Each structure stands twice: as C-alpha cells, then as structure tokens.
Image (tube, rainbow, N blue to C red):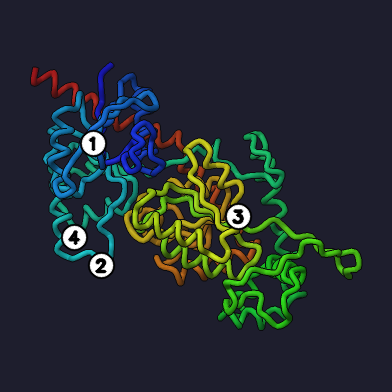
Amino acid sequence: MGVVSILTHSFTDGYNREFGRVFGGGLERYILDLCSVIRGLGHIPEVHQLSYFEAFQTRTEQIDVYGYDYDMENVPEAFDRMAAAARGPIIYASCLWQPITYKPGSLGICHGINWDRPRLPLETKRQVADHIQLALDGLVRIVSVDSHFQTFCRAACTYTDSEQIVLIPNAVDTSYFIPAPPSRMLTPQHEEEWMTTWKRDLPLQTEQEDILVKEYRGDAADHHTAGLNDSDLDRSSGEKARTKSFKREQGEVSGVGAFSFENEFAEPPSHQGHDHTNDAVPVSVPRPIRILYPRRISSERGIIPMMLAADKLLGAFPDVEVEFAGELVEGSTVGRAFRYWQRTHPHTVRIRQHTYDFKDIRDAYHQADIVVIPTLFSEGTSYACLEAMSCGLPVIASNVGGLNDLIQDGFNGLLVPPGEQALTAALIRLVQDRATRERLGIYARETALSYDLSIWRSRWSRVLESFLAETGLKEAIQT
C-alpha cells in the first residue's frame, strides 16, 4: 500500500473558504470518484490543490487535502511546489494548458478544454497548443474525458504513441439516477416496471395528444404571434390544451396569445376563491412544468443565456417554473448579478435556487421535466447531462465540447448552438410538446446505460494498475 497524489486547482471549497467541504463541481466529483478507485486498488489517495486564500490542510471524505496559496499569474510555480511536496506517483488532474514542468513518470487528466472560446486571441490558442505539447512530452499518459481534447491533440500536436491519450468519458451511477415514477416513489425496484410501462404507453399518449392538437387548432394564430409556424403546432401536444385551460381559469383577456411575449412580465391574476361549481367543464390545474439548470452559476456554464431564456419562458407560460441547482460563489460578479435578477424579477415566485450535495441532487431531477445544459465553452462530458439522461429526462444542451459525445440531436436530446436565441426556441418546443419530451427521455436513459459508473471504474482501474506498475518498476530500477 502506497500514497498516490492528485494535483489539481480545485477540490475542497476554496472559492467560499469552506476548506472542509468538497466543492459541488464536475472536477471535484471526478476526483472524489478517482480517489475511491485508488483506494479500491489498495493505495492511499492524497489531494494537493490551489487555494484562493491562505494555505491549508484538512481531511474530508477520508482524504488528506493540502491547499497552496499562489500567484494567479504564475500557476506553474504553484504546481512545482505541489509536486515537490507530494508523495508517491503523481496524477496532474487539471491545468494541462499551463506550461507546467511535470515530474517524470506522471499521469495527466484533461477534464475538457477551456480554450475553445471563439473570441480568445489566436496567439493565446497557439500558446495553449505549445503547452499541451509539453504535457504530451512530459506525461506517460493522458486520460481525456471527451473526444474533443483527443481531436485537438491530433490536429495541433505531435506524438508517436496512439495510446498515449486514453478516452474515458465521465460516468453516472445508473442504479441510483433512475427515472422518477409518476407517484414519485424513488426506490430502485420500481425502475424496470416504470420503464416498461412508459414505453408501452407512448404510442397511445401520442395518439391522444394528436387529437388534442386538432381540437385546439384555433391556437395556431397565437403560435404565429410568437413567430412559430404550423410545424411547431404539429409538434405540440396536450401541453397546448393544458396551457389554454390554465389561462382560461386565470381569467385572461380574450385575444391575448397563449405564447405571446408582449406581456411577459405580467403575472396572471389570482384565482383564489374562484367557484368552479357552475363551470361548463371543470378544470384542474396541473403540476407546473419545471425547467432545471443543474450547473454552477458561472459565465462559461451559460448562466446569462439561461437567465435571458427564463425571462421569455416565465413571461409566456404561467405554468412554467425554473430551478437553478448549482454552486454559486457569493460575492462574485456573476453571483451578485444572479441574486439581483432573482430578487427583483417579476416572476420571482417561480424562480428557485438551491445548492444540492452530490448525494441529494437526484431529488432535483425527479422534480424536473426539462433539463438545460447551456454551456458556452469549457465543457467535458457533463455529469449533470449524464445524470439527467439517466433519470429519463429530455436535455437541451449546447453543441460544445463533450456534450456532442452524449447527445444525438432529436434522438436522445436537443443540441443547439450556444446562446439565448436557439436555447429559447428549444425550450418553447419542449414546454409545448410532451410527447417529444417523453420520447427523448426514453432514449436518454438508454444512452446513459453505456456510461455507467461501473464501466468507468473498470477502465480507470486498468489504467491505474498499468501506471502504478510501471512507476514502481522505474523506482525499483532507480533504487
């Protein structure tokens, strides 16, 4: 049994000075799972990370963690100090785009490239290619979480060993992240029965929804008011009828389009105390459609396009609510902007924000109807995307980074260009179209099964066994 050191820029929460808590991001979750694999092979994992504040030492999740203060203009110097203090074989788990001097015989991980910003200066991108070449020259092997990085290296760098870059996509525990039955009973034994019934009933649901579409064909004018065409109407489902019934119950003025954005900041009048006894057709208000953004509230994760799209959706659909279920760095520019937007928004009662732990994020998926991954740049194979897919939810994702490895547009989700306009259009489509939501969710779940955590652990175990055996042999020779 020996120590294996992981060097990274973030693990425990150095953003909010909560050093004893693992930060709720994809990198941090990845390192936590990797430590479990290392421990399963009979070794002891240690984590060395950068600290945005003072140096620290802590222990969390049975892992010793060492934090290093650093100069943001000189990240490689901090990695030099981490490598000098680290014990045993070293795994560089981030910052491969920096000009790091790697300790010989070490392993690296690329968690997704962050130099894919269209506006990043060309000279900077050329420098990154040089720095990645340093990683290829200095590391015995690099594990990539997506094909994006692998393609970049093949196009911009040189190396002779075709197996030096190992593709191991991120993973999801498909036995835990399961679709939520309508009863919200979340025990695993319900999964098989629920999925079988779901698939069996889909043709009948589609037929019923087509009947409702024809019945409410008069809504076409309202769709055209919002710039939608007949194909959008044909794709829609009983959601259209449901929205119309909801609006009738709210007592809205006749002639205002159900999907018009003209009055998007007006809440519908309260219907408390309304007596339905004499209504021709009794109406029951259904559960709101919940759109879930399960990402860090940060610029690269597309929080601004998401907020703009939420403005449109909340104004147009009274039965839509939005939940932001990710880490937020209080006091940051983006964090302050989001808090102000949420606090002052005219539909603030339908905007939720909650930071979930790794263990309870499933609750957010089980209350959601649509999941949004609107990344602008710097994306690997998103944990949130995989978790949502495993829960049988339709995902709208930007065609950025490793998301292209997970989503096949129109089959198991929707892929859109990064930005507010395409995101809003896709959200409108799925809010209106229950049949498409369910169809995408079925195939999302089936896709997620090939990314099961057990497969990831097996692949990483083989890489680590080879790496540690080779490292031990070299050390024995040197001794």
Residue type at numbered disc 2 = Arg
Asked if the residue at tag 2 contacts the one at tag 1, i.e. Cβ–Cβ closer than 8 Å, the answer is: no
- Say which element carries label 3: loop
Gap in angstroms between the C-alphas marked 2 and 3:
34 Å
Q: Residue at x 28, y 30 (%)?
A: 47
Query: What number of labels is visible?
Result: 4
Q: CA distance from mark 1 to mark 2?
A: 33 Å
Q: Which residue is mark 1?
A: 54
* Crowd tier of the residue under label 1, counting other residues whose Cα lies within 10 Å: few below 14, some 14–19, many 20 or above: few
User: Residue 434 placed where, x, y %?
Assistant: 65, 61
Q: Nearer the viewer, residue 374 or 193?
A: 374
Who comes first in sequence, dot 3 or dot 4?
A: 4
State the residue position of label 4: 125
For the residue marked with disc 4, what is the amino acid?
Answer: Lys
Residue located farthest toward the left when viewing the structure as drawn: 478
Q: CA distance from mark 2 to mark 4?
A: 10 Å
In primary-sequence order, the first of circles 1 and 3 is 1
Quickly name the residue at label 3.
369
Of the pair 214 and 377, the residue shown nearer to us: 377
* Residue type at tag 1: Glu
x and y, in percent, of residue 219 in the image: 70, 78
Badge 1 or badge 4: first in the primary sequence: 1
Q: Residues within 10 Å of mark 2 (few under 14, many from 20)?
A: few
**Residue 119: assigned label:** 2
Above or below residue 27? Residue 244 is: below
Q: Are marks 1 and 4 in contact (CB under 8 Å)?
A: no
Tell me, yes or no, if residue 333 can be seen here.
Answer: yes
Tell me the quarter of the image containing the C terminus: top left
Residue type at mark 3: give it: Asp
Mark 4 element type: helix
